[in-house]
Image (cartoon, helix red, strand yellow):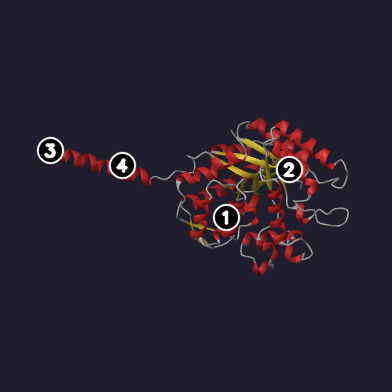
Amino acid sequence: MKRLNQIITISLLMLFFASGCAKKKIQFSDLPKIDAHFHIRYNGPEFLDQAVKDNFKIIGILTDHYDLVEQENFILKQWEHHPNDLLYLTAFSMQGWDKPDWQEKTIKWLHSAFEKGAAGVKVWKDIGMEYKDRDGNFIMIDNPRFDPIFDYIESQNKTLTAHIGEPKDCWLPLDKMVAESDREYYSHHPEYHMYLHPEYPSYEDQIHSVEHLLEKHPHIRYVGCHLASMESSPEMLGKFLDKYPNTAVDMGERIDDLQYLDQTEVRELFIKYQDRLLYGSDQGIKADQDPLAFSQKVHKIWLNDWKYFSTDSLVTIHNTHTKVRGLNLPRKVLEKIYLKNAQKWYNWK
């Protein structure tokens, strides 16, 4: 009987401790994380100091919207502060697109950036929404003149990252948009509000141009920014990822779009495609900003996003009073979307 009581006691203790371990959630500061979509245009150490405190590393992204040499210099300066905590993606200029030597010059620029440590190349929505050729046609991302550029990126084992198109809200009037953040952005940037520009390529045109690009370059490693502009439909995004297995997406500035959707459907998306989703905030710091105030702002964003992904608590959608339930993702999924996927898709050892 004494032996039996000892066995029962030990068994109960094991169940107790197992239950306690199972309930223990990974904490924000415990998990090494990567913000895979960030823009840095200042020289000071304050922001990356905060990132390190929050156990974050950063992927800084250049765009053809600002001077590329200046942006690259900002990144190189940040490496002096935190050489092991920052990776960057270069970009290329569309200036001289119609000139015969544009491709050669572009590949030369990319070669130089790769020599300096760039892990990939970002193309922006000005392709498809702004630039036109000499005949007045919009230049889309599947234009044949890009093929040698993308072939070169693939040959160097680098990642092509693309912000092509915009959320579906972009093609709606302001009062019909789903996300408050979209309403705020397009009210201040009417040049990119496609509802006001019906003569521009459609939402479907943008998506099809990416699909055609991936059909022409099936082996290129590709990350679609902003959920590949498919933030309004987990089903559509899932079909895209199924069709193009060498692709992933980051969620920069589209987390609130997800929060308006059915949360069960969103959670299923994250579970099923846990190897293809990268956390990113799409925040950016400029030289004229208060770096300490900005760092605290980003800290709060990171904490709020973590709460949404890691718990089933109520979180408030950005710039609204609307509360939604968190996804309460398993630990292994959190580890992938916050760390392992960025390491894999950007070859960050």
- What is the C-alpha distance between the residues marked 3 and 2? 74 Å
Neighbourhood count class around disc 3 (C-alpha, 10 Å): few under 14, some 14–19, many 20 upward: few
101 or 332: nearer the viewer: 101
Q: Is residue 318 left or right of residue 211?
A: left
Q: Considering only order in the chain, which callout, 2 or 3, is on the residue closer to the N terminus?
A: 3
Q: Nearer the viewer, mark 1 or mark 4?
A: 1
Please state the horizontal and vertical placement of residue 284, each as a whole percent of the image: 67, 46
Q: Secondary structure at mark 3?
A: helix
- What is the C-alpha distance between the residues marked 2 and 1? 24 Å
Q: Secondary structure at mark 1?
A: helix
Quarter holding the N terminus?
top left
Mark 2 sits on what residue?
150
The kind of residue on which mark 1 rests is: Gly
Please state the horizontal and vertical placement of residue 87, each as a whole percent of the image: 64, 36
Mark 4 sits on what residue?
17
Q: Secondary structure at mark 4?
A: helix
87 or 40: nearer the viewer: 87
Q: Nearer the viewer, mark 2 or mark 4?
A: 2
Is residue 15 something that shows in the picture? yes
- What is the C-alpha distance between the residues marked 4 and 3? 23 Å
- What is the C-alpha distance between the residues marked 1 and 4? 39 Å
- Looking at the picture, does residue 173 appear above or below residue 56? below
Mark 3 sits on what residue?
2
